[in-house]
Every structure is written in structure tokens, then in C-alpha cells.
């Protein structure tokens, strides 16, 4: 007696399947009236006692010979198979689909041919000399095959129809034409495995390897993989099992690089990758990927500014020299924009701690920026470069001042100390027509003053003295600067008495 042993959740077959409906008609027309004939009293082997070999070195099973009258033909058959429902797996007797497939006794018999059944190793074992009836005892081999429904979502009638379909496929040499959907392959594969019908197993696996799956079908595939040989399951496993633990991070990093460097619709690609980063299951993995991409873009910008600010001795025409300088500035500009997008993503995910620390340790980079911005060449080549660089600084500084990033005192101090001189140079060399730069620089002034207010008074004193350039012709136009100095002097005028401060 055989039953489904996979425990998998199967999908419903389509009720209008022509192959199944024709099968039901054949079965009804060929069943004898009255009760079933008693089966042999000899014990039959279970499917678990006939194991699939671990290698495929055995010769292939011969194809089924042509049978004149074919499946379920009592005039030529020499095997009677009793197909019945396993009573240990109850089903709803009111299911109309079940009533179409089976009668009230929930069992029927099918006439088959031993020469065809030998394609199944299970039936081949039953038909071997060990199980063959003694000569002259009876004209038929008689076997029982139990059908169970192991899934609450798979009706017993479907399970019966699937068993009948697999039996029919024993008569079909072109199995690929009978397996036309992933759900069909998943319904037939467990039965083919039970019956050790190797040709059908191969056809089902080959189909599943080549077609897409739904999420439910993928779960079923995963439950069936342990029942397959290693060489059979290799392609299925390759689709669903990562070959290494950091594959997701590698994929994310590749998507970021493609979105910011190579994709023709860069804005759309960036928006899509941003969504992937927001929805990614591991925040730490996303952080590592962004840190890596940030460092790569930052290095390109730094190297380009280094080459622009300290060019090597170049012997050639002045036009060639200018072309190289222009290329350096454009490279810095392009990667600066990538850097800004990365910083926005890092702040959005609250994963910019490393970026802030790295940005605060750029004394050489900020010195090169000051030299570049004091030169008028950038105005004609990349007028937006100061804005891009300072927007990166402003994004990180705002996150620190707002407490989105909890930076250490040393990081806060160095962030202002290194980037304040760049801000001052940008303001002094600002093109009057670029009014948007003015609002950016004012925002950064206010943010730097907020960060300075978080530092010890000695460090604040040093940095505030450099902020005098924030002052304007009308003192009333720089309230942020007035407030910062008022706060510092208020604190400085407090007198320490014993263990307590004297409030002035």
C-alpha cells in the first residue's frame, strides 16, 4: 500500500482539464459491476522498501511498447490495480469535485499492462518473480494502491486524478507534452517519486528548472528537494540557495554602482534602489553596502581634487593642460553628486555614523577644496561644484545637530574645524547670480553654530572666533551669530562657587 509521503502542500488542478475528464470517463465505462475481486494474500512491498539508487549509472528503463488498446483496456490487460482512498485521510463527502472523480465506495480498479508498468521501479518489483503468482492460479496480477491527501488545500479527488495521470503517463513516451505548468509538475512529482517512475521524475524536474514559480510553488519545490538526488536537485537549489553568505550585499552594491554610474535613466534607477535599501531586511547589511559605496565615491572626489590642486609637471600645450584640469573638476563634480545621494540614503536609514566620522577627518581634502575654490577656473568649468560639496557637508552636519547621528565630541569638533574654512572660502567667492548657494551657506552657518554650542567652552571659543565672517552689514540680519555669542558669554560669565554654579 502506497500513500503520499512528501507532506507537501499541493495546488488545485483546473477542473476543466481535458486529460482528467477523459480519464474519469474511461474509468467509469470500464469498471465491472458488483464488488471488487479479492486481491492476492501475498504481502506487497511498500515504496519505502524499494529505494531510489543514489547514482544514475544503471541502464535506462526501456520505453513502454505500443499497446494496441492502451490504458485501462480490460481485453488486453494483465494487471488489475485497485485504486482506493486511504480512510486515515478523511475528506468532505459533499465535495462535488470528489463525487465526479470517485463513486460512493471511493475506490475503483484500472486495467493495466505489466510490460508498461515496468517503467516504474516500484511496479517492476511487484512484478518480479518474488511477487508473481503461481502459474495457473489467476490470469491477472492484482495490486492495491492507496491514495491519500496530505494537504488540507488539496482535495482527495485531485490526488486521485493525479495518480491516474501518472499511471497514464506510463503509456506515454513523450512526457514533456503532458507537463505544461509548474503546478502540474509539482502535483505529479511526489507521485512519480512514490512509484519510482524515473522518466516522469526527470520530466517534472526539467520543467521546474526552466519556468518561473509563484511564492507558493517555490515553497513546494523546497519541500520536495530533499526527496531528489543531488544531481537532480542541483539546478533547483541554485535558484533558491545563495552560494555565499554575502551575496545580498554584493547584489545591493552592484545595484548602487549601476544606478549612479551606468543606468541611462539614473533618476528612476536611484529611486528604485532607494526603495530596495529602505525595505532591505538587514539594516546592518545595508549600512555596510552604503559605507563601501560612500568610501569609493569619496576617494574619487578626493583624488580628482588632489590632481587639480597639485598638478604634476606637464610638458605640452596649454590647451592640453586645461583639458586635464577640466576633466578632473568634472570627475569631482559627477562623483560629488553620487556622494550626496549616498549620504541622503545613509541618513534616511540612520546609518551615517561612519560617513560623519570619515567626513570629519578630511584635513587634506578640505585644504585642496580651499585652493580650488580660490581659483576662478571652476566658475566656468563646474560652477555647481561648491554647492554639491557643501550640500554633502550640510546634510551630515544637520543630522549631527538634530541628534539623528550621535557623534562623539571629537567628531563634532573636527567636523566644524575642517569644514568651516571651506564654507568661508565658498562665501567669499560666491557668484552673485547663484542665489541658491546663499541660502545653503546660511543654513550651514546656523548648523555649525548649533554644533559649536555642544562643545566645551575652550573649543567653542576657538571656533566662534572664525565665525565672524558670518556677520553682515546689518547686525540684525545675522541673529544666529548674535545668539551663538550671547550663549557663549552667558556661560563664560557664570562663577563657580564650591560645587555649584552661580547663575548671573
Image: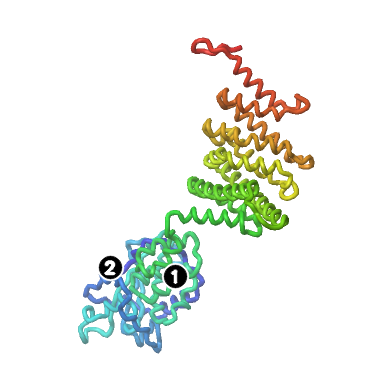
User: Regarding mark 2 in the picture, which secondary structure is present there?
Assistant: helix
192 lies left or right of 438: left
Whether residue 437 sits left or right of residue 104 in the image: it is right
| Percent x, y of residue 45 | 25, 72
Considering the numbered disc 1 on the image, is that residue within a helix, a strand or a loop?
Answer: helix
Write down the residue under mark 1. 185
Check the picture and name the quadrant holding the C terminus. Answer: top right
- Please state, as top left, top right, bottom left or bottom right, where the N terminus lies in the image: bottom left
Answer left or right for 22 relative to 475: left
Circle count: 2
Q: Nearer the viewer, residue 164 or 103?
A: 164
Q: Residue at x 39, y 61 (%)?
A: 223
- Name which of mark 2 and mark 1 comes first in the sequence: 2
Mark 2 to mark 1 CA distance (whole Å): 22 Å
Nearest to the observer: residue 395 or residue 5: 395
Q: Nearer the viewer, residue 458 or 10?
A: 458
Q: Is residue 58 above or below residue 357?
A: below
User: Residue 315: x, y in percent?
Assistant: 66, 56
Amino acid at each position: 500500500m502506497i500513500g503520499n509521503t512528501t507532506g507537501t502542500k499541493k495546488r488545485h488542478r483546473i477542473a476543466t482539464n481535458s486529460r482528467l475528464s477523459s480519464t474519469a470517463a474511461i474509468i467509469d465505462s470500464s469498471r465491472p459491476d458488483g464488488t471488487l475481486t479479492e486481491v492476492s494474500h501475498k504481502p506487497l512491498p511498500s515504496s519505502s522498501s524499494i529505494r531510489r539508487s543514489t547514482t544514475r549509472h544503471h541502464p535506462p528503463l526501456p520505453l513502454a511498447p505500443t499497446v494496441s488498446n492502451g490504458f485501462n483496456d480490460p481485453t488486453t490487460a494483465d494487471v488489475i490495480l485497485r485504486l482506493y482512498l486511504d480512510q486515515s485521510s478523511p475528506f468532505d463527502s459533499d465535495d462535488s469535485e470528489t463525487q465526479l472523480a470517485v463513486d460512493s465506495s471511493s475506490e475503483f480498479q484500472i486495467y493495466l499492462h505489466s510490460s508498461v508498468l515496468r517503467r516504474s521501479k516500484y511496479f517492476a518489483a511487484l512484478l518480479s518473480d518474488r511477487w508473481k503468482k503461481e502459474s495457473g492460479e489467476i490470469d491477472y496480477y492484482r495490486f492495491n494502491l492507496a491514495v491519500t491527501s496530505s494537504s488540507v488545500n488539496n482535495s482527495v479527488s485531485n490526488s486521485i486524478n493525479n495518480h491516474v495521470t501518472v499511471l497514464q503517463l506510463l503509456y506515454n513516451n513523450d512526457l514533456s507534452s503532458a507537463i505544461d505548468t509548474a503546478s502540474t509538475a509539482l502535483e505529479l512529482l511526489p507521485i512519480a517519486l512514490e512509484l519510482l517512475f524515473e522518466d516522469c521524475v526527470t520530466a517534472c524536474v526539467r520543467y521546474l528548472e526552466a519556468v518561473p514559480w509563484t511564492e507558493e510553488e517555490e515553497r513546494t519545490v523546497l519541500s520536495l528537494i530533499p526527496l531528489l538526488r543531488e544531481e537532480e536537485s542541483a539546478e533547483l537549489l541554485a535558484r533558491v540557495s545563495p552560494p555565499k553568505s554575502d551575496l545580498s550585499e554584493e547584489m545591493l552594491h552592484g545595484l548602487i554602482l549601476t544606478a549612479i554610474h551606468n543606468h541611462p535613466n539614473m533618476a528612476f534607477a536611484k529611486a528604485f534602489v532607494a526603495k530596495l535599501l529602505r525595505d532591505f531586511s538587514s539594516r546592518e547589511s545595508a549600512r555596510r553596502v552604503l559605507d563601501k559605496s560612500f568610501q569609493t565615491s569619496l576617494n574619487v572626489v578626493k583624488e580628482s581634487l588632489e590632481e587639480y590642486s597639485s598638478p604634476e609637471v606637464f610638458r605640452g600645450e596649454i590647451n592640453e593642460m586645461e583639458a586635464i584640469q577640466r576633466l578632473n573638476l568634472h570627475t569631482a563634480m559627477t562623483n560629488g553628486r553620487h556622494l550626496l545621494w549616498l549620504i541622503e540614503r545613509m541618513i534616511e536609514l540612520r546609518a551615517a555614523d561612519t560617513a560623519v566620522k570619515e567626513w570629519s577627518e578630511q584635513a587634506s581634502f578640505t585644504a585642496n577644496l580651499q585652493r580650488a575654490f580660490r581659483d576662478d577656473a571652476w566658475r566656468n568649468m563646474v560652477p555647481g561644484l561648491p554647492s554639491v560639496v557643501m550640500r554633502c557637508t550640510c546634510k551630515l552636519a544637520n543630522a549631527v545637530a538634530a541628534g539623528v547621528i550621535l557623534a562623539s565630541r571629537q567628531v563634532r569638533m573636527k567636523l566644524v574645524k575642517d569644514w568651516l574654512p571651506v564654507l568661508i572660502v565658498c562665501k567669499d567667492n560666491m557668484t552673485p547670480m547663484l542665489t541658491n548657494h546663499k541660502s545653503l551657506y546660511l543654513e550651514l552657518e546656523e548648523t555649525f553654530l548649533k554644533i559649536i554650542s555642544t562643545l566645551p567652552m575652550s573649543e567653542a571659543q576657538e571656533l566662534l572666533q572664525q565665525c565672524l565672517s558670518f556677520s553682515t552689514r546689518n547686525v540684525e540680519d545675522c541673529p544666529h551669530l548674535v545668539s551663538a555669542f550671547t550663549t557663549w558669554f552667558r556661560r563664560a560669565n557664570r562663577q563657580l562657587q564650591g560645587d555649584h554654579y552661580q547663575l548671573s
